Image (spheres, helix red, strand yellow):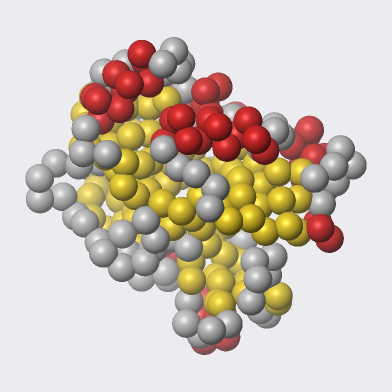
Amino acid sequence: MIDRVHHVGVVVRDADAALGFFRDVMGLPVTEDRVIEEQGVRGVLLGLGENEIELLQPTRDDTGVARFLESRGQTLHHICFNTDDVDGELARLKAAGVELIDETSRDGLAGRIGFVHPKSVHGVLIEFAQPPAGAHVGTGKGFDHLAVTVADYHAAQATWKRIVGLEVKGEVRAEGRGMVIGQMPCSQCTIELLAPTGPDSPMAQRIAEQGERAASMVAIEVPDIAAEIARYRGHGIELPDAQPGVLPRSVTSTVSAEQAFGLGIQLIQFER
């Protein structure tokens, strides 16, 4: 059973430098840090409530992660979902004719893992992970939401239900931005499908230029956004004053991906 987002993976050039932000500025604890020789990467997991952020630093130039870094730079690499039966999930998808990278699980930083090809999920690389007994498990709220851009809203809904078992439970019509946001709850996090409402909308133009993909951003709910902004600024991080967000009753401010080693950090506070 898939029950939550386990982590988002971010490819970085220097994990130690990235830890200076994620560990020392954000205050996230390191739950795992090791080199996986056969994959040619150093992986670092940092806990954030029930979720984690995974830093991936290539240790060789002849690996897929190294080629990804060379072509895309520091940015989000994949979204990983927690499951109690990774081989069962892979077998289910193989039987359904879904294109996979791994038809059987292998060892990874998060336990037994397997990847679904991004061609099968509208440009998003999806990982399933079955952590070993005794692995770190958080219970608090971590990510408020993650976002993926999709050209065909209805086709994407069907895909995410088939692959991950998630369904749209709510919608936000951001008419001023020419897009609809489909909200798919996954434990305490929501996966957002961002789709254009017309061919001339900014979202449609963005997809035409970049393709469908996961946004390199995580949103984190905070109780006092002004205090959080001040805290980040105290560390020398530049971010704007809080402004009304796209989601109802929200205000947001974002640490840019350029300052956060390829992963934008959106702070969001909701009016209660």
The reply to whether residue 258 is visible in this rendering is no
Answer with left or right where residue 165 lies relative to residue 195. Answer: left
Q: Is residue 85 above or below residue 95?
A: below
Answer with left or right where residue 212 lies relative to residue 82. Answer: right
Q: Is residue 13 above or below residue 26?
A: above
Q: Residue furthest front?
A: 169
Q: Considering depth in this image, is 2 or 15 the residue closer to the camera?
A: 2
Q: Considering depth in this image, is 155 or 21 the residue closer to the camera?
A: 155
Answer with left or right where residue 10 lies relative to residue 130. Answer: right
Where is residue 128 shown, x and y percent of the image? 33, 34
Q: Residue at x 50, y 44 (%)?
A: 167
Q: Residue furthest right?
A: 200
Q: Residue at x 70, y 76 (%)?
A: 243
Q: Residue at x 71, y 43 (%)?
A: 195
Q: Is residue 71 above or below residue 14?
A: above
Q: Residue furthest left?
A: 133
Q: Quadrant of residue 229?
A: bottom right
Where is residue 241 shown, x and y percent of the image? 68, 80
Q: Is residue 42 above or below residue 233?
A: above
Where is residue 10 shown, x and y percent of the image? 46, 44
Where is residue 266 shown, x and y percent of the image? 57, 65
Q: Residue at x 76, y 50 (%)?
A: 179
The reply to whether residue 171 is visible in this rendering is yes
Check the picture and name the quadrant holding the N terminus: top left
